[in-house]
Amino acid sequence: MSNDAYVPHPDRLLPSDPAVRDIARGLYAEMKDQPIVSPHGHVDPRLLLDDEPFRDPTSLFITPDHYVNRLLHARGVDLADLGVGRGPLDEQDSRKAWGLLAEHWHAFAGTPSRYWMEHEFSEVFGLTTVLNPRTADAMYDELADKLTRPEFRPRALFDQFKIQVMATTDDPTDDLAPHDALAADAAFTGRVIPTFRPDKYLEAGRSDFPGLSDALGEAAGVDVSTYDGYHEAMRARRLYFRDHGAVSSDHAHMDPGTARLPLEDARRLYSQARGGTIGEADAVALRRHLLGDQARLAAEDGLVMTLHPAVYRNHSEKMFQKFGPDVGFDIPVAVDFVHHVAPMLNDVGHDPNFRTVLFTIDETVFSREIAPLAGVYPSVYAGAPWWFIDAPDAILRYRRAVSETIGYSRTSGFIDDTRAFCSIPARHDMSRRLDATHLAGLVAEHRMRHEDALELVATLPDQQPREVFRLGAAGEKNS
Amino acid sequence: MSNDAYVPHPDRLLPSDPAVRDIARGLYAEMKDQPIVSPHGHVDPRLLLDDEPFRDPTSLFITPDHYVNRLLHARGVDLADLGVGRGPLDEQDSRKAWGLLAEHWHAFAGTPSRYWMEHEFSEVFGLTTVLNPRTADAMYDELADKLTRPEFRPRALFDQFKIQVMATTDDPTDDLAPHDALAADAAFTGRVIPTFRPDKYLEAGRSDFPGLSDALGEAAGVDVSTYDGYHEAMRARRLYFRDHGAVSSDHAHMDPGTARLPLEDARRLYSQARGGTIGEADAVALRRHLLGDQARLAAEDGLVMTLHPAVYRNHSEKMFQKFGPDVGFDIPVAVDFVHHVAPMLNDVGHDPNFRTVLFTIDETVFSREIAPLAGVYPSVYAGAPWWFIDAPDAILRYRRAVSETIGYSRTSGFIDDTRAFCSIPARHDMSRRLDATHLAGLVAEHRMRHEDALELVATLPDQQPREVFRLGAAGEKNS
Amino acid sequence: MSNDAYVPHPDRLLPSDPAVRDIARGLYAEMKDQPIVSPHGHVDPRLLLDDEPFRDPTSLFITPDHYVNRLLHARGVDLADLGVGRGPLDEQDSRKAWGLLAEHWHAFAGTPSRYWMEHEFSEVFGLTTVLNPRTADAMYDELADKLTRPEFRPRALFDQFKIQVMATTDDPTDDLAPHDALAADAAFTGRVIPTFRPDKYLEAGRSDFPGLSDALGEAAGVDVSTYDGYHEAMRARRLYFRDHGAVSSDHAHMDPGTARLPLEDARRLYSQARGGTIGEADAVALRRHLLGDQARLAAEDGLVMTLHPAVYRNHSEKMFQKFGPDVGFDIPVAVDFVHHVAPMLNDVGHDPNFRTVLFTIDETVFSREIAPLAGVYPSVYAGAPWWFIDAPDAILRYRRAVSETIGYSRTSGFIDDTRAFCSIPARHDMSRRLDATHLAGLVAEHRMRHEDALELVATLPDQQPREVFRLGAAGEKNS
């Protein structure tokens, strides 16, 4: 049917006013073909190491994508019918899940999930119809067919996407063998680097903290029965990561607290945590101290410290028990950066080797806290909008909230933060279009010279994250 | 005088860009003539039962409208001169109050109060001048004259407004006789349904709590000397309301806390509340437990639970003592939904019979909390902007804050929440225009297909609130 | 070089849509040439008393401007190289600092700092090039040359800027001799008035509180060894300020708390503060009580009370120790006005002699708290966006957040709040352009009649702050 025909419009996300759109088109043209630098994300490095074909459309596009699953679930779909918490679906169930997406696709109109996926359908897989119950089976077939072809294997896509650097997120005890293998593989020219993500090893109130700290010590070859040993183990594992290509560590606790304890208190509370006797408030206090320690270690080893705080994880206990984490029941909460990061910035914030990037889903802190902090501390950068607010209107709100205080130079550059490998180019492209839109507005209102905007975008997608994340120049693989 | 001539522009609130406006006009045209479904409001059902003519312009437009009175008061007008806290004004004072409105009308430029009222003047009453001191008397006369005519009586207006369903807000002890009479009245074809609003019966710290709970027990025919009896009385009154047409309960406390107490604590605190000896913190704890109980009862009886929290009522004690509540001194405060509703959603949030709609005046929670919650819990909907933010720019901010996470399907549909009967069509029309504006922007920026937007608006004003509030299909009166 | 040529565009900040821009141009034209009324700022009165030539471009534009310094510092520039914390720079270092600004000027693209400065370069100093490393020296020379000319001395600029009233900010112990001298100087026709800023005299937890209160007592000729004496000293100094032309007091604490203590507690805590033994929490409690006292005194003496709360001052202790306060390390935090000002408004909020203007950098309170408060209390006004949010997008957000509740009449009028004398006309002009843009949007969307917008702007820049700050009619010097 003719009204099923659909490819995304070339001017999508650009301003609708013709005069402003012309400016935006020119700015976007400068950015469109720049390579992708992705300093923070959640793709599994084995995807590229093994280079196996993707199994089927459902396991590629639906099952692991909690953005998609959550809205389907809210509309009454059982997560299990999408493959969540099950092994891979068989052909029949996979097609059925695909049909559920098609049935509810209209409710995704205007969401970034649909926007990204339509970009992928069209620009990655060459589909030319809109998803709906009429087209679902044919689209499934065409995708399934293409996924078997060599040009749609992960490495081929990695090249097609022009990804120069892609960071993964890794457990401190990981030996990083996949990263090493990729770095050693002459046939693979990309740069896939690990990120040190020690969250759970800092959560001193977890019942499994003794075992976690043991595992950390084992990986480091250090006795962690004392706070000092634990600290040494952390230092060692960070260095291990850095030596295997990492440029950053990532930290996502309930708050970005970094208050320091007197050393004797830290030692005492650590022992209590090891013994499983630490109280709730003390566990929070120790975690904040340990996050402050991570900042000290960052000032030593130079890993850029990214903070992603203030998400109430697994809001529904029932769903957590049934399906585990990361199935859509993580809900943001309000956050105070100013007080929480003060101890850290007073400790190492003026150390030229220390650097931190502050991410938030609580938009209120952009103009109030993050831009003012990033606009004065040489060590602080404003992170791009994250998770629920990595979306067109929210991204424009972000630019309009922070640019008046810090311009573009104190921002992180775009971060895709995704586990959906095929969405990477769509997400970066969205960001470039929106920066073009934001800047075109400034130019059209004579708030920025056209030549200044052109000069800015000439290096924005590529150079800005390279500089912020100390990635060095293009062409380098892992050091 | 020629510059006193004024009727609202047919394109008002639509985008000023001609290309986008054309799209918006088309979308608005699909919505303009759909009937009004009003699932939450504050009109007195006796207005329609008695069908008496409105008394005069001042008692219709000014005295009961705290939106209008408050700004007049801020500008120096004594509330008493507007009829607040007095019986109906005589002709001279009523005209004088009208003159005060005219004198200050310029200061309302750009406010929704003026927008709605000008819509009413023109589209309901056929006036063709702007209100100012020159036109005030003539407009008063013309309105006063029209109010005596049969076509401007409440029932005639109800039909003219094309209201299919209108919910009122009612005390749990109310016998709902007016609703029954309206339902039984073959001459009245509209559907006027009650809403269960038990706020004060949950506020265990009120000095009149013993009397209130007694009254509840009396209405239910249940002994409320114990917590268990009180709970049974609540169950009975909710069922009574449901049996008399109610589809929802409404709850407006200082916070949306739903933390449960151990049963023995609830019983003990209830006894203290009955005895007038409960402490302040315990009263809050008990109130939160009782709100959690309302959620449990909602899962039983299927009444949709609407939350309107976080307003500091009667901020000025002096004005409260002089004029009582609802005279404009209610001020919103910041709110945290995520932690507060967690106990409730963990209790009944996955029960298919339970449903809640979260309303806020604190706009920060739209993108941060409400959209993420409504985008994953099948039982949670994002309420339309309420009270101070039921206004054009704020409504667009709302759509832009929530749509990227949940589209339109997880939103409540428009809620007028008004005690100003004649403003109902103006408010619903404003909402339709703004949805057209929002969607036209998405279409013009190629973020939504035009056909998807058209499909959405074809049922948005009518079907969305029907579905969310379990109102059934059009044509039904009270069951 | 040709692409170095630059003067700001006459339509800057106006809407880019041609139809809306036409309306905005007309509205701006009504405001453009109105005189400047500046009821709150930080210019030193001796600047105008002495009327010495400005020393050089760096000490005029860079060293004292923490907006500029902070972003340069974040980008790696040592504050000392900009003259911060040093005496005036010699010619070589001054030129070097200017070169640093030129080198980083591209990073200021889109910031208000650059916008204001480019306005000043062009409209005040007649420069016609953009600042960059190629043009830096020539621009420095031209500016340095012009600064020696009589027409660029402070008084000549004061006249050129058409400043009618300019408030300074002054210590309660100041004898205000410069103000008196200016008022007595027949050759100077401007009105330069002091503002009573007692912050540190209320901070009972400061180690220097005993000395500060002694100084206050000395200035007042009152024994301050007791709370009652201190209160009397405050009363006397406020009256002294009022008698020397002040129309307002200004208050910038960590929170806007005004909770009253029982009199005996206030007396006791005051004695502890005098004795240096007050605890931290008690010091906060006493400070809030004393702020409530300021409100009582304001109801007596009629000084308008402006609140500028919720900034975490000197966030970096290291930089504070090195450079002192006001060097860019002040970071805003979230604020709650509703609870904090309730005691004050219940105390004097209905007194016709009391008036307060609420300023915030936490934008979330505009629609939630400040507009609702200013829209009902006759004594409360919504302050213009302040500091980090005195910037185009933020100003438009402010208008869109508050206008729907309170229109324009309950807002403060524009406040430049600046210590950068030459930026005053640029800042006021920016505000006028943005009000034109906001109102033109309302007119173009048929939300406000064109004639209402024209009527509003006819007096907005001049009359609104005169009324709010009780400045009387134009032409008056200090009373």
Image (cartoon, coloured by chain):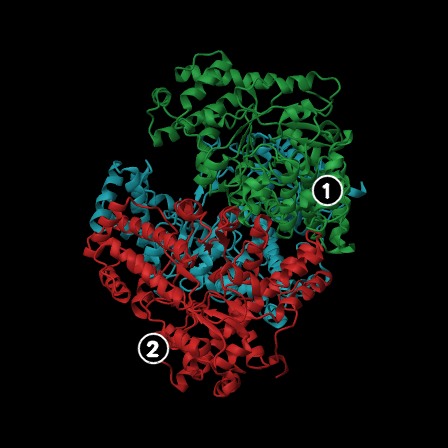
Chain colours: A cyan, B green, C red
* Residue C215 on image: x %, y %: 25, 65
Q: Residues within 10 Å of mark 2 (few under 14, many from 20)?
A: few
Q: Is residue A14 rendered to the left or right of residue B314? A: right
Q: CA distance from mark 2 to mark 1?
A: 66 Å
Residue B301, quarter of the rendered image = top right
In the rendering, at what x and y percent does residue B336 appear? 46, 40
Task: State the residue position of label 2.
Answer: C86
Q: Is residue A14 above or below residue B280?
A: below
Where does residue A468 sit, x and y in percent of width and height? 46, 62
Q: Quadrant of the N terminus of chain B?
A: bottom right
Marks 2/1 same chain: no
Res. B338 in view: yes
Q: Residue at x 69, y 65 (%)?
A: C26
**CA neighbours of label 1 inside 10 A, class few (<14), some (14 to 19), many (20+):** many
Q: Nearer the viewer, residue B216 or A252?
A: B216
User: As shown in the figure, which amino acid type bears the numbered disc 2?
Assistant: Arg
* Chain for disc number 2: C
Is A6 or B438 nearer to us in this picture? Answer: B438
In the picture as drawn, the residue positioned furthest to the front comes out as B92
Q: Is residue C141 left or right of residue C449?
A: left
The circle on residue C229 is: none
Image marks 2 and 1: residues in contact by CB distance under 8 Å:
no
Q: Report the residue marked by disc 1.
A: B121
